[in-house]
Structure formats: C-alpha cells, structure tokens
Image (cartoon, helix red, strand yellow):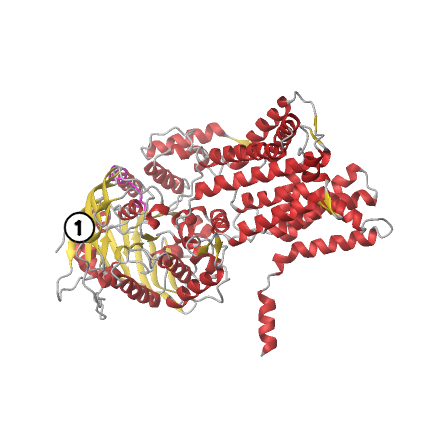
Amino acid sequence: MKSSILKERIKKIKLRNYVIYICFLLLLLVFAIILRDTQFLSVNNIMNILRQTAMISVMAVGMTFVISAGEIDLSIGSIVALSAMCSAKVVDMTNNIFLAFLSALAIGIIFGGLNGLLITKVRIPSFLVTMGTEGIALGLARIVTDLQAVSIVNSKYNFIFGSGSVGIVSILFIWTIVITFIGYILYNKTSFGRSVLAVGGNRAAARYSGVKTDKIRIIVMMISGITASIAACLYTGRLHGARYTLGEDDVMNVIAAVVIGGTSFSGGKGTIIGALFGSIIMGMLNNGLLLVGLSVSEQMIARGIIIILAVSLSLREKKSV
Amino acid sequence: MTDERLILEIHDIYKSFYQNEVLHGVDFSLKAGEIHGLVGGNGAGKSTLMKIINGVYRKDSGVIKVDGEEVFFHTALDARKAGIAMVYQEFSLIPSMTVMDNLFLANEKKKKGLLDRKEMYLRTKEVLARLHLDVDPNLSVEELSVGNKQILEIAKALMHQNTKVLILDEPTASLTGHEIEILFQLMREVKAQKIGVILVSHHLQEIMDICDVVTILRGGVDVLSQKTDETNLENMVSAMVGHKVEKQEYLAPSVARTREPILQVKNLYWKNMIQDVSFSVYGGEVVGIAGMMGSGRTEILNMLYGLAKPSAGQILLNGKEIHLNHPHQAITQGIGMVPEDRRTCGIIAEQSVRMNILLPIWKRISKRGMIQEKKGRKIAQEAVENLSIKTSGMEQSLSDLSGGNQQKVVFAKSIVSEPKIYLLDDPTVGVDVEFKSSICREIRKIADHRNAILLVTGELDEMAKIADRILILKHGSIIGEIVREAGQEITEEKLLLACQSGEIV
C-alpha cells in the first residue's frame, strides 16, 4: 500500500522539470573528469566562475519575467552600457555612491518603461521594440563620453559593486543570491508572479479574468531594465570603471541561460532558480572550455553545440495536435 | 430549374463515435441544380453527416452514391476528386496572400516550371466576373470585406472544373443583410450551373427564402424532408424540437427577487450592432437573452463586462451609473463572466486546475503581498468538489481535461470571485448532458443567493428550463419579452419560433 503511494508520488514528479539540474551535474562531472589535473574544482576557480556569471545571473532573473510573460527583451546589453556609463560618471563627479546607483536604476526603469509602453500602447512586438531601443541606448552610451572610458577611483563603490568579498565569498555572489531571492519571491509567492504567468499563458483569458495585462507587460519590461542596470553597476565595480562596450554580448547568454533553465520560450511557464543554474552552466562552459585548452573559435563552436543540446532537453515544446 | 437527376444519394447512414451512436440511418438526396437546406439543433448530427459526405469521417454503414455510382471516401481528397466541395465556416484563405494566389493555392498554373502569372490573372478575372465579385486579383485577401471573403471562399471551391456538390456551412453567420443578398444571388447562379448546393444553417427564414428543399435532422435521424413551398416555419420548428416525452421542468426560484434591480441597462447602442437596448435584472432572478447567432447577444455581455465600450447609453449598478473600460473594473464592481469561447478566453491550457481557478483572486488571497497557498488550495479544492470536476489532482494541467471539465473550471473561476452579477455566455457549450442539468441547478443556486444572472445561450431548452424572464433579441434590438407567469410553461418550441420569426405567440 505504502509503496504504491510512493510510486504514485514518484510518477507525479515530472522529470522534465529537473532536466536543468541533471544537466548541471552532468556538465560538472564531465569537466571534473576531463580537467582533473587542473584547478577546475578548486574553491578559487568555482568562486571565479560565480563571479564571472553574476551579471548574467542577475539579468536572467529579469529575463525570466519577460519570457514568462510571452515577451522578449533584446535591449538589455545596451541598457547595461548606458547605465554603467551613467553610474560611473555620477560617482566620478559627485562621489555619491547612492546617487550613482539611483541614476543607473533610473536608466533601467526609463528604458524598460519605454519598451513596455511601445509594446502595449503602440502594439509593436517586443522583439522589434527592443531591437530599436537597443540601438538608442547604445548610441547614447557612446555619446556620453564620446567613446571614452570612465574609471572609478571610489574604492567603496568598487567594493560594494563587485570587487569586495565577505570572507571568501565574493560580493558579486551575494548580489546574485539577493536578486535571485527577491525574484523568486516575486515570481512564486505573489499575485504579480501569477499574473505574469497568466499573461504569458493566455493573454485573452488573463484579461477576461481581470488581470491588467498591459500593466503586467510594462512592469516585466521595467524589471528587466532594472536587473540590467544592477548588472551594469556590478560590471563597473568589478572593473573599476565603465566602457560603452560593457554588456555587448550578454543578451544571447542571458536568453540561453533562462531557456536552458526551463522557462518556456512561448511564455506561461518558468523558473527563477532554473535561470540561476542556467547562467552558472553558461559560466562553467566558458571557464571549462577555456581550461580544456580550446581556442576561442573552437570554444564558440563547442558552446553553440552544448547550448542546443541543453535547450533541446529542457525545452521540447509539446506537439500540437 | 432543377432536373430530376440525383447527383448525391445517401441511404441509411450509421455512424458512432466509440459507444455513442450519432447518426441512426440517415437518408438524404440532392438533385442537380437544387439548393437543399439542412437544419438541426446542436448535436443533431448535421456536421457529422457533412463530414461523412466530405470524406473527413468514414461511415459505419450505409451507401453514398454520386451520380448514381457508389463511392467510398477515405480522405477529403477522395471527396474532392468526386466533385464534392465544402466551404467551411472558418475561412481557409490566407489573409496575407492575394486573391489570385489564394484561388490557385497548391494548384498553380505553370509554364516551364515557373508560375504563369498572366494565365492565372486572366483565369481569376474570369472567375471573379462570373461571381460578380468586383475586386482586383492582386488585392490582399485581408483587405476584403467579410462578405467578399465568403464569396471568394466559394470561388475557391468552384475552381475545380468537376464540382458537382457544393456544401456551405453556416455561410451567413457573419454577414450583413446586404452581403447575404449577394451571397444568395451567387447561390442561384451556382444552381443555374447544375451544381447541387447544400446549405447548412440555423436560420429557418433563410432556408425558406433560398432553398428548394429542406431536410431536418434531430437526434441523428432525418425527421423531415420537404419542399420549402410546401412547409412553413411552425412545421419546421416543431420538427426540430420534436415532441419530447420529457417535459422541461422549470427550476423555480426559492426566494423572491430583490425589490430594486441590481443591474439596469438603458438605451444601449454599440456600433451598428446593438440598437437601443434597455432591460433590468433583479437579484435572485435568471434573465435569458434569446437570439440567433449574430443577433448581438454576445456584444451586450461584452459591454457589461468592460470588453467593449457602448456607443451610447447607460449601465447602472444598484441605481448608480458605472463606466467599464476593462474586465478588471467589472470584477471589482461585482460582475463575473463565463465567456463563450473557452479555449481563447477562458482557460490557460498549459497551466494547472488550481492555477486556472484561482487566477481572478490571487490578489484577494494574498496577505502582505504573499499568496496564502493553503487558503488558495482550499478554495480551489472546494470549487472542484462543488462542481464535481473530474481531475486526477489540483496540479493536472487543463489540456489533459475533457472539454466539459474544462468548462467546469471556467465556471469555477467566475464563482470563486464571488460576483453579484453573473454574465453567462453559453455556459454549457461542449458539456455532457449530465453536467448540463447540474450546471442549471448550480445557476439556480447562485441566483437563490440573491445574485442577478444574465444568461445567453443557443441551447433554448436549457433557457426554457432555467430562465425566469426571457428577452428576445433580433438584429441587435429587443423585440419582446417572455415573462413566466404562474403555472405557465415556456417551451423550447415557443422560444425558437420567437427567435426565428420575431413573433411571440
């Protein structure tokens, strides 16, 4: 009797939902074996991986909301660049860390809000809207200092936003955990999170059920903008300065992390924790492939193949009848 | 006009789905150059019969003859080759492509392997001229009016030279009066080409106007087959309804209705579809709006739910005027809806039973911003039990549920938000008979809590069973009201006749 209940339980656990963790362990195992003679599994290297992926992890939180709501945000890369320039410039001029952080957040909120308004009010698909704003934000980031890099000498700023550590734990990792935790609560425990899933699952049904669908879609774009500007601050803190090239390759990494994590690309289903693991997988790949000794070009090919494999495991859309 | 040659003969067709026999020996015959109306209520078997003729379904037994020769269709293509063309309700045209490209889709004219656009253009011109459709062959289909799309759809069906039988499934459902006239003209021309036309329709008046012969199906049997000039509306209605042994038992209210109306609608207009509609609904009563498809019944509900904005007129809630711009506002005011189209507006198929039921009330069951999952689970569990939704668990996704159970979830969804006014748009569509009566009881139970219910449905027997008052809607205007007086019976027949003819007897 008891065993049948247990069997029933086991049956109910959908393997698909755990593919990401299996992938994670597999990849870890493979690298651990191949790279057993290197420092891959050392505390130092693992912390290094987590440090490198912190920005992707933070942005993946925002992107999970966006993709779950059935939208996409291609503008995060240049929101990072513009926010970083802005934050660096402000801290350079005023030495006020808080003001610098706020100015970066403002950029994220403004661009996220603009994206949201264009998507809902002008009814342009998010894919196209964010392709446009991506260009605008990048252009502005280049104009701010006329392509010059800005360096940050405020050591407190650098400590808080990336270079510091508590014991052996990098402050970047703490940021990752905090943002992921807030995202997790918002996504899983609040009516807002459920509304996001409803909008992504079936927008008309959500509307009929009293969900303010336009408001939800604007807010998810703003969340994505905010996480991008937080990531921007982390970049500047870690690098002690800002350049307009920051964040330029991040969009694809973030989207890949979210989708590998198990968030449905068509919306309505997703996971914040999965996105965190997705981004760590991306980081592990970058780090491991480098340690294996592949050239940059070879790394690109290997990464592409592994991403396709991982996505095909976690995200096979149901066959429609 | 018609000659006596039978182009399509159907004898003694039986068809079952699993244990459920849908057609019990149907006979049907069509002459060349005849327009033959096919009528029947929901579930009478007319679409099954059409799909058998069209090769989509296979008959269990019986004989189908085309031009006197027995045929066996295994696919729709077989039927197509035998000269049977079907025009579906949902358009099969590709909106972004041109008129010409649609007509020749998968049948393109070629010259040395390349498209022969000149030849196709000329052929299209010719076809359009024959149908008196004055449009440019290079126009995108999306730029055509609904009426012209319907005509183009028929043109596409007639592109094949050998078409002998043309089946039109509810072609007038979305057309305006003028467009219907053009369509009828076209049908007469098709008829003159010695093609047999089968017209499937709910509108008996239309059948009388255009058809030579009418066949009525009820419960999978052909109960009437007559020349239209030898019959009349009353005959057809009573054949459709039949003489039911089982009487429609009226589910009477157990409380008196409130003294003041909860909902009042005054002189409501919407575009050119709703004309000067006024009515009120009291707490504790079920008011039905009976009307044909396209009479504007759904539009009225949409305005009351904030999905459409009235062009003019007032909506009053407890005597106070309200303005609704979004369903969210309607729900806050205590108005709930069970929408007509379950798949697109009712459910989120990929999500669980629990997530769907609780969708309208996540905010309400949150405390300090956090959802109280326990409370939600309890509410959802209760709803599932009350409506006896068959599911393996609260976490089962809706796509795994039967249509009837999905509909129950939609119903549960509006119940959990505890409205005072329920707008029910075909609440039992696609639901099994057992649940139909249980939903009727549920509706009465809700009304007995002094809630106001506005019921729109095509299932008139249901309305006869549950509604305390019935408004008759035709072409967007309320043309009459049937009030149930003590001991008086409202029959399906009476309702159907009122909707069809616009006269209340």
- Give me the residue at 55% from left, 45% from top: A65
Instruction: Report if residue B281 is visible in the image.
Output: yes
**Front-most of residues A31 and B192:** A31
The relative height of residue B51 versus residue B329 in the rendered view (above or below) is below
Q: Is residue B222 magenta?
A: no
Looking at the image, which residue sits at the far top?
A: A146
Q: Secondary structure at mark 1?
A: helix
Residue B112: image quadrant is: top right
- Residue A199 point in image, percent of width and height: 47, 47
- Mark 1 — on which chain does it sit? B
- Residue B387 point in image, percent of width and height: 37, 66
**Front-most of residues B129 and B327:** B327
The relative height of residue A75 versus residue A61 in the rendered view (above or below) is above
Looking at the image, which residue sits at the far right?
A: A37
Residue B285: image quadrant is: bottom left
Going by the image, does A214 lie left or right of A12? left
Residues in magenta, as a range: B171-181
Count the marks: how many? 1
Quadrant placement of the N terminus of chain B: top left
Q: Is residue B178 magenta?
A: yes
Instruction: Report if residue B73 is visible in the image.
Output: no
Going by the image, does B279 lie left or right of A13? left
- Please name the residue that numbered disc 1 is placed on: B501
- Residue B419 point in image, percent of width and height: 32, 55
- Residue A189 point in image, percent of width and height: 52, 54
- Give me the residue at 69% from left, 49% from top: A309
Looking at the image, which residue sits at the far bottom?
A: A1
